[in-house]
Amino acid sequence: MAGIKSIGILTSGGDAPGMNAAIRAVTRSAIFNGFSVKGIMRGYKGLVFNEIVEFKSQSVSNIIQLGGTILKTARSQEFTTPEGRKAAYDNMVAAGIDALVVIGGDGSLTGAGIFAEEFNVPIVGLPGTIDNDLGGTDSTIGYDTALNTIMEAVDKLRDTASSHERLFFVEVMGHTAGYLALNSAIATGSEAAIIPEMETEVDQLAELINHGFRKSKNSAIVIVAENPKTGGATALAERVKKEFPQYDARVTILGHIQRGGSPTAVDRILASRMGEAAIEAILDGQRNVMIGTMNGKIVYVPFAKAVKHDKGIDRGALDLVKILSI
């Protein structure tokens, strides 16, 4: 904590609903504790190109309900180079920033870890990603909202699916993680979830058609996690055409709709708690940690553990989809 007077905030990588609630909480908790606050526009790119603005309490008025991020976000090729990071550090020093709060997913926190190590900068991360794929935390900011968005979309799809005899593949985001697919399958009463974590174990499509898709059902909805390995929903629908031509397979890719929208109460509260905890962590002298929650309690997770992707999937949830789809 010694010598820290000014805190910089940035959002990086894919946006997630609740990021604004987190920006608000970090800003106001910092000011409450006597720090000055600088908002860094467009993520690490803004740090490299010196897009740094003074933040006051009113800078974050009336944003808790907004999706996206008022600080904007961008991918930064420059920050992946030592020269880019040196420029970012020089701008940070010139702006008088002593510590950073980085809100983003695994790429953002990986970058934060490298930057912290190279320049000895105290950084605290907040898990802002709809994918819920960061280690050491039960949930990430934006995950609950995305889950609700998927649920609403699938409910609407079911209305039309039940009017036709069709197999609907709905592709959801998740990067390399099946949490969104699995939990939205439970929430929507879908017949199955096809997720990357099970890829090596079973032929999920054949299993679904041979066991799961029964004659008594005239339509089925299957939630598919986007996955470069399997080619996602489109590749699965192609397989159905070839191997099971008796089924009429349709594909709906929800895409970036999942990232938008006003955050749910769950995400606003999570982001607010985590934002305040980030400032507490800095006051505590913590560095290079991500704020997580485990069983409702705030925890500090080292960056290296946060970005490991070793959360593991809940087998009970997989069984539940199967049991409830009979």
Image (cartoon, grey):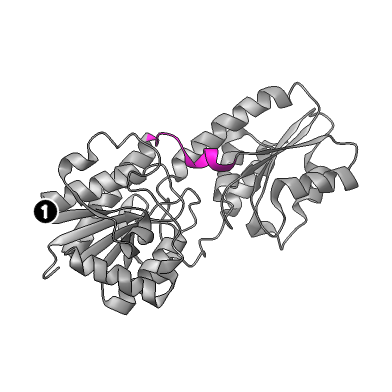
Give the residue at mark 1. Answer: 33
Residue 239 point in image, percent of width and height: 83, 48
Magenta stretch: give its range. 255-264
166 to the left or right of 185: right
Quadrant showing the N terminus: bottom left
74 to the left or right of 227: left
Residue 92 point in image, percent of width and height: 24, 66
The outermost residue toward the left is: 34
* 302, 103: nearer the viewer: 103
Q: Identify the residue shown where x is 46% and y is 63%.
A: 107
Quadrant showing the C terminus: top right
Residue 252 can be seen in this image = yes
Residue 300 can be seen in this image = no
Q: Identify the residue shown where x is 42% and y is 67%.
A: 78
Residue 322 point in image, percent of width and height: 69, 43
* 181, 3: nearer the viewer: 3
